[in-house]
Image (tube, helix red, strand yellow):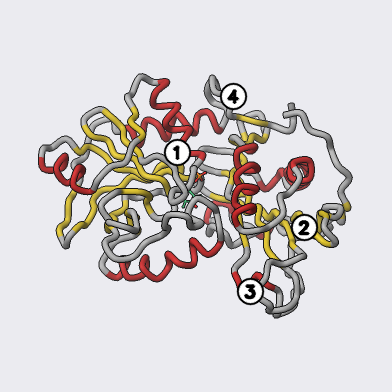
Amino acid sequence: MNLQDVELDITLNNASRIDQVDFDNLVFGKHYTDHMLICDYVDGQWQTPKITPYGPMQMQPSSKVFHYGQAVFEGMKAFKDDQDKVWLFRPEDNFKRINISSKRMAIPEFPKEYFFSGLKKLLELDHKWVQKGQGNSLYIRPFAMAIENGVSAAPSNAYRFMIICCPAKAYYSEAIKVLIAQEYSRSADGGVGFAKAAGNYGAQFYPTNLAREKGYQQIIWTDAKTHEYLEEAGTMNIFFRIGDKLITAPTSDRILDGITRKSLIDLARHKGVEVEVRRIKVSEIVEAHQNGLLKEIFGTGTAATIAKISGFEYDNKLYDLPEVENPYSVRFKKALQDIQYNRSEDPFNWRFSFED
Ligand SMILES: *Cc1c(COP(=O)(O)O)cnc(C)c1O
């Protein structure tokens, strides 16, 4: 990446909290690193980005984000290899995507040099928080929101862009059971489903709670119009393996363009597996299940990389998936992680380090 460093206004944290963290028993999202990035947009421009100690901030109760949900976010990870070098995975894609999300939510685009200069400094200052070892990573959360005071329902003229980071641990991820949506929807044509808009998540919590009460961890979202087509798995993209072929829905204004999704498509094809990117009906997977051809279903996203799905409910019927030998979900998860942790070749040029 060809980038110019921009000047940052840095206030160091002289009281690191890293010694208080039990890295062996991490609770995801509980501990944040010593520093954060904060940059305000006022008078029509982004001001000098600041790096400050992580901590609470004061906001007016009338800040627009609290009333109208004008906010977007990203999720990305940093990994440490055996030589203590820190790597990011396709970070330019996250940067581009937050600006795509911002545009849809009428938030001004954030400059690339600010984003990467800030991130570079954060990773430099807080590099100890990136732990070595399979499954360990630093979860990076960039986000932007409307901070103008006043409850008038018009786009804000002041915004805040931030990056906070928290250590994440390899958690043993059990296969999940899912419910195929027949009533609620996550997104609709012309809506904000393609954006990482904060409200997309808020709106999922209630139907997901209902699904949990029935014993399902996630909802498979279908198209809002007919509920016949399979679109996403909770907050992940979704793949179906029928026979030896993988099928995933094309991205659209209802489906988020996941970086793990597109990486998996390229990786699977690279390894000689056929991948079809096309709309897929619930009836097709039910039929494939009956014919014994439905081998695997899994979700993809930065948090879990690949999350195996062991069964689904549709029309009050439960469909269990068989255990298969050498599943794609395990094989490709390992292949992706080998690239992320710098344990294998990276023929796609996905790894990125500021230390190069
Ligand atoms: C973030 C997200 C994903 C996964 O995207 P990645 O870039 O792979 O992390 C998938 N679906 C939705 C709705 C998301 O918000």
Ranked by sequence position, the earlier of labels 4 and 1 is: 1
The residue that disc 2 covers is 38
Earlier-in-chain disc, 3 versus 1: 3
The mark tally for this picture is 4
For marks 1 and 2, the one nearer the N-term is 2
| Above or below: residue 140 compared with residue 52 | above
Circles 4 and 1 in contact, beta carbons < 8 Å: no
Reading the image, the residue beneath label 4 is 349
Where residue 291 appears, x then y in whole percent? 10, 38
Mark 1 = which residue?
Answer: 261
At horizontal 60% and vertical 35% (from top left) the residue drawn is: 90
* Position of residue 254 measured from the top left corner of the image (x, y, whole percent): 44, 51
Which label is found at residue 66?
A: 3
Q: With 172 as the anchor, is 283 left or right in this view?
A: left
Name the spot of residue 138 as percent of width and height, x first.
61, 47
**Which of the pair 200/352 is nearer the observer?**
200
Quadrant occupied by the C terminus: top right
Callout 1: helix, strand or loop?
helix
Residue found 72% across the figure and 57% down from its top: 161
Q: CA distance from mark 2 to mark 3?
A: 18 Å
Instruction: Specify the amino acid type for callout 1.
Output: Arg
CB under 8 Å between callouts 3 and 1?
Answer: no
Rate crowding at label 1 as few (under 14), some (14 to 19) or many (20 or more) other CA atoms within 10 Å: many
Q: Amino acid at mark 3?
A: Phe
- Give the mark nearer the N terminus: 4 vs 3: 3
Q: Which mark is residue 350?
A: none
**Where 238 falls versus 144 (above or below)?**
above
| Residue closer to the observer: 324 or 3 | 3
Q: Give me the residue at 56% from left, 50% from top.
A: 168
